[in-house]
Amino acid sequence: MMPEPPDAAGRRGRPPVVVYPVGSLPGADMAMLEAARDALAKVSEVIVPPRDARAFSVPAGCFFRITSIEGAQVGDLNLWNAADLTERFFSGKTRALHATHLGKGDRLWSTLPQLRPMATITWDTLGWYGWDADGAGVHDVIGTRCDPYTHRLLSGGEYHHCCHSNLSRALAAARGMPVREAELLVHDVLNVFMCTGFTRDTHQYFMKASPVRPGDFIEFFAEIDLLGALSACPGGDCGTTHSSDAAACFPLKVEVFQPAAGSLPGWRPAPASGYSRTHGVG
């Protein structure tokens, strides 16, 4: 342990500065989206089996909803531009622009060089949870996804129903590609319904039993044409373990809804970043 310098208290006492002030961040027209929610027509439904994943498509301008239907269950969500899988959800930038845990009005941003909103959260029945006494919240963008590589590193052996593997299989099936090719497109997730935080003493990432109950849902508005994949995590409610067959696991439901004609006046799919991409060269 290094000794503290004489000015240690002064260094620690400097005021925090928010990295990305949100005043200039483009936001969704939430009043318009809330009005559009009043007349939605269901166009498709996918049931995601326990310890597995399924892909689904959402046209730009439609809504999609992830619902707990049988028991407390968390899900790992990936999103891609349906026309270009190299553009995908950027959890790190989303976290930097919004917060460690997302809620109504927050947007899911895509990778560089596009950096645009892919989806906007329009409803969240767990919005009441807030922050608990342990410093935990729901719907985090701090965890990566359970994966067989970390499982092997920490526990040994092979486990094929981690969310990373589930999402890889789902994408491979949806696009008719080899699973090893699909794996390279799987990315860090939105941990839907997952209750997480960092311990105050060791600052380690922790999880606790999700507050989700059957009937709870989180809803999104698709800002571009989306291909999504959702894994019903092998940890169930993640209150005890993950990456195993020990936890009670339940299915999740994904529904896609189309708003009524004329309910999104003036809305257009989100454009890609206008940055020139010259990076100061030429």
Image: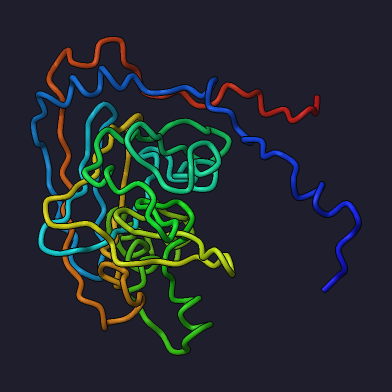
* Residue at the image point whose x is 29% and y is 29% from the top: 60
Residue 104 quadrant: top left
* Residue at the image point whose x is 37% and y is 81% from the top: 159
Residue 257 quadrant: top left
Where is residue 214 shown, x and y percent of the image? 12, 56
Rendered position, 137 above or below 23: below
Rendered position, 184 above or below 116: below
From the viewer's perspective, tell me whether residue 158 is left or right of residue 266. Answer: right
Residue 43 quadrant: top left
Nearest the camera: 92 or 261? Answer: 92
Count of number-bearing discs: 0
Where is residue 33 shown, x and y percent of the image? 25, 23
Where is residue 176 shown, x and y percent of the image? 31, 57
* Residue at the image point whose x is 30% and y is 22% from the top: 30
Nearest the camera: 92 or 114? Answer: 92
Where is residue 55 shown, x and y percent of the image? 26, 53
From the viewer's perspective, tell me whether residue 72 is left or right of residue 230. Answer: left
